[in-house]
Image: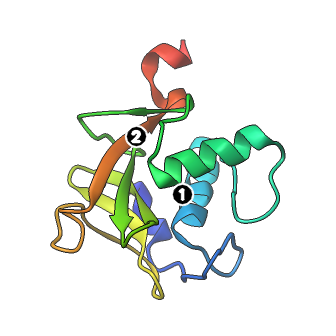
Amino acid sequence: MSWADEFVGLPYGDCGRGPDAWDCWGLVCKVFNEMLAIDLPSYASDYVDSRERDESSALIEAENCPPTWAPVDQPEPFDLALFRLGAHRCHVGIIVATPMMLHMAHGQYAKIEPISAPRWKNRLLGVYRHHLLVPEAAS
């Protein structure tokens, strides 16, 4: 049993931020808050400030990596895997253990599956780590 098992089965909701449904970023926000005590910007509604909007949009769109996130070559638990879906949509999953991720299946529920599954392997944009999870940042 892993930390991710308690999130498996949570229901999907478009632009979901709980408590009854989540989308992929809503799931990331929930996991980071409950497991790591890290509050991430929501981006689903109003922003506290423009920095939050720019940070979350840049991460989700995998454009220029915001200072809060750094690309990594060796995924570890709680890193985020970003995927391209279609021309403009992105999807995000949370690394549980390489090569597995927890993510919100669109229209379904949260589940764990390999990032190398046929649906994902050619769509991976990169893996990113929050700066608070980097050992140097914690000291």
Estimate the x, y position of residue 82 in percent, counting from the top left.
38, 54
Q: Which residue has dot 2 on it?
A: 128
Q: Is residue 39 visible?
A: no
Q: Earlier in the sequence, mark 2 or mark 1?
A: 1
Q: Is residue 16 above or below residue 31?
A: below
Estimate the x, y position of residue 15 in percent, counting from the top left.
64, 74
Q: Residues within 10 Å of mark 1 (few under 14, many from 20)?
A: many
Q: From the viewer's perspective, is 50 left or right of 13?
A: right
How does the figure colour the protein chain or chains?
Answer: rainbow
Q: Is residue 27 above or below residue 96?
A: below
Q: Which residue has dot 1 on it?
A: 28
What's the residue type where badge 1 is placed? Answer: Val
Estimate the x, y position of residue 3 in percent, counting from the top left.
43, 56
Q: From the viewer's perspective, is 59 left or right of 42?
A: left
Q: Residue at x 45, y 87 (%)?
A: 108
| Quadrant assignment for the N terminus | bottom left
Q: CA distance from mark 2 to mark 1?
A: 13 Å
